[in-house]
Amino acid sequence: MLGASFDAAPDNSAFASKFGFPFRLLCDTDKKLAIAYGAAASDKDGYPRRLTYVIGTNGAIEQAIDTKDPAGQAAAILAIVA
């Protein structure tokens, strides 16, 4: 499991520590990842959309989920992949 945000490494590290994330947050400061995955329309976007992708072992996206409840998303994902 990975997360991504537009923030720089120190900010991501502090955020992950604050909320006890057991996974890494990628730094998408140039917003290219978000644009490629549809979480941002352009590099002018201030924030990415909250999306969750389930990626198979072959690297293909199996599901794209609009994350409406970030706190409850982990349980929903586990139900999908289990």
Image (cartoon, rainbow, N blue to C red):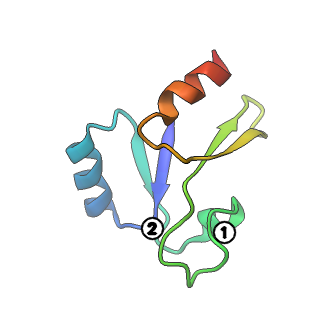
Residue identifier under label 2? 6
**Residue at the spot 63% in from the left edge and 62% down from the top edge:** 39
Badge 1 marks a residue whose secondary structure is helix
Q: Quadrant of residue 60?
A: top right
**As rendered, which of 12 and 45 lies closer to the eye?**
45
Q: Is residue 45 left or right of residue 70?
A: right
In primary-sequence order, the first of circles 1 and 2 is 2
Which amino acid, mark 2? Phe
**Residue 38: x %, y % from top left:** 70, 63
Residue identifier under label 1? 35
- Please count the marks in the image: 2
**Residue 4: x %, y % from top left:** 48, 54
**Residue 46: x %, y % from top left:** 48, 77
Question: Compared with residue 40, is residue 70 higher up or lower down, i.e. above or below?
Answer: above
**Residue at the spot 62% in from the left edge and 70% down from the top edge:** 40
Q: Is residue 78 left or right of residue 26?
A: right
Q: Quadrant of residue 22?
A: top left
Q: Is residue 14 left or right of residue 39?
A: left
Q: Are marks 1 and 2 in contact (CB under 8 Å)?
A: no
**As rendered, which of 81 and 32 lies closer to the eye?**
81
Which amino acid, mark 1? Ile
Badge 2 marks a residue whose secondary structure is loop
